[in-house]
Amino acid sequence: MVEPIKSFRNYLALSVVLLVASCSSGYHLVKTNRAEYNVNKELTVDSSIIKTYLPYKAQLDAEMNKVIGHSAAQMSKKSSDTLPESLLSNFFSDAVLEQALKYDQNIDFALPSTKGGLRVDFPKGNVTVSNVFELMPFENQLIIFTLKGTDVQQVLDYIASTNGQPVARLQMKIIDKKPTDVLVNGKPFDVNKTYKVLTSDYIGGGGDNVPAFKNAIDQKVIGLKIRDALMNYVIETEAAGKTINPKLDGRITKN
């Protein structure tokens, strides 16, 4: 066995030499320079750069401006930020939940994003691809967590203490920043049960100070981004000959 080992060592040494030689470019850094170039209105237009990117811009604009649906109402980002319930938060949560139910029918309720995750108004009339990207510009994935009732209670406390959040299949009153009369998918909340909660990888990871998911009994990544869920909902609603028509249904009220 001596000769094979010796041969292997020689082969290994040769390989290292060749590898080092192959990684060397033959160039050596001898000097570096640093300069700042301000981009402002006084800068001369470089037509060659514009000419280069214009075809790509035209293609992107055509894709982003494509009308994929229609909405019966303007949905306000400001209302979503300031009220316990809004057209925007209801539309968003219901749309995402509807798509996630295709992967798991046993989801008890959804908190697919916090208010801060909804970035802009959603328009009345034509809905474009760009509108969906602007509303949800993030790449967050949807995850179904199985939580103990005590951890769900923390989620409910968080929703109440922050004056409501975008939710679906969840109903509550907020009194003195505490959740009361809570219904989960139409049934009274039971702290002794376990629940399947749909949310994002951002919230599940503790984003926006929602710590309740760290002790999850189970979690399932369903392979669907929130933005894609929204996009699918808008496209499917249009294909069914329907108009997006969000409603306020009193799912979260405040004294």
Image (tube, rainbow, N blue to C red):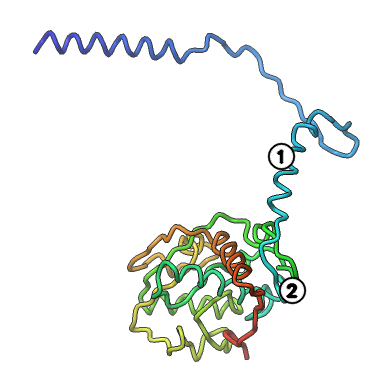
Q: Residue at x 67, y 73 (%)?
A: 81
Q: Secondary structure at mark 2?
A: loop
- The answer to whether residue 31 is above or below residue 95 is above
Residue placed at 27% from the left, 13% from the top?
12
Q: Is residue 53 above or below residue 153?
A: above
Image quarter (top left, top right, bottom left or bottom right) of the N terminus:
top left
Which quarter of the figure is the C terminus placed in? bottom right
Give the image location of residue 228, x and y in percent: 55, 59
Residue annotated with mark 1: 56
**Residue 145, percent across and down?**
40, 68
Residue under label 2: 74
Give me the disc on residue 237: none
Q: Amino acid at mark 1?
A: Tyr
Please, is residue 18 above or below residue 211 in the view? above
- The residue that appears at 33% across and 68% down in the rendered structure is 217
Q: Specify few, some or many for label 1: CA neighbours under 10 Å numbering under 14, 14-19, or 20 or more.
A: few
Q: Residue at x 47, y 68 (%)?
A: 100
> What x and y, as percent, mark residue 5?
15, 13
Q: Amino acid at mark 2?
A: Gln
CA gap, disc 2 and disc 1:
31 Å
The one of 158 and 56 positioned closer to us in this rendering: 56
Which secondary structure lies at badge 1?
Answer: helix
Q: Write down the quadrant of residue 91 in the picture.
A: bottom right
Where's residue 231, x and y in %?
A: 59, 62
Nearer to us: label 2 or label 1: 1
Query: Which quadrant would residue 70 be assigned to in this image?
Result: bottom right
- Give left or right: position of 145 versus 43: left
CB atoms at circles 2 and 1 under 8 Å apart?
Answer: no
Name the N-terminal-most of marks 2 and 1.
1
